[in-house]
Image (spheres, helix red, strand yellow):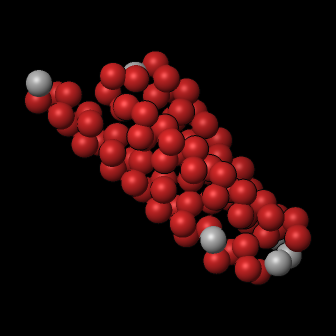
Amino acid sequence: MMAVYQTGVQYQMIHALALLALGAQERVSGKVTGWLFLVGIVVFSGSLYALALSGVKAFGAVTPLGGVAFLAGWAVLAVNALRKVQE
């Protein structure tokens, strides 16, 4: 369960840093990316924390939804960055 907890911490830290970078580059990223990262942090990392601390396996079923939010956030960021480069 320690590895599960560490995975949650790792993804939370990476995306918290990405949120800080988004704040500096608001024009490139837009608000959608930030919200998707925030949802990903809460759902992905939060479900891993709940799983690791409680041992209730049902929390693990929610984790992929947070992963989808992370992937969608990165996709929106990439599309917005490509659009900005083409302008």
Residue 52 percent across, percent down from the top left: 82, 67
Residue 56 percent across, percent down from the top left: 82, 78
* Residue depicted at 33% across the width and 22% down the height: 27
Q: How many marks?
A: 0
Q: Residue furthest bottom?
A: 57
Q: Tell me, yes or no, if residue 1 can be seen here.
A: yes
* Residue depicted at 49% across the width and 37% down the height: 34
Residue 35 percent across, percent down from the top left: 50, 42
Height in image: 25 above or below 61? Answer: above
Q: Residue furthest right?
A: 54
Position of the N terminus by quadrant: bottom right
- On the picture, is 5 further left or further right than 21? right
- On the picture, is 12 further left or further right than 52? left
- On the picture, is 10 further left or further right than 81? right
Toward the viewer: 78 or 39? 39
Position of the C terminus by quadrant: top left
Q: Report which quarter residue 15 is drawn in.
A: top right
Toward the viewer: 19 or 14? 19
Q: Report which quarter residue 31 is drawn in.
A: top left
Toward the viewer: 6 or 81? 81
Height in image: 73 above or below 34? Answer: below
Q: Tell me, yes or no, if residue 3 can be seen here.
A: no
* Residue depicted at 17% across the width and 28% down the height: 85
* Residue depicted at 87% across the width and 65% down the height: 53
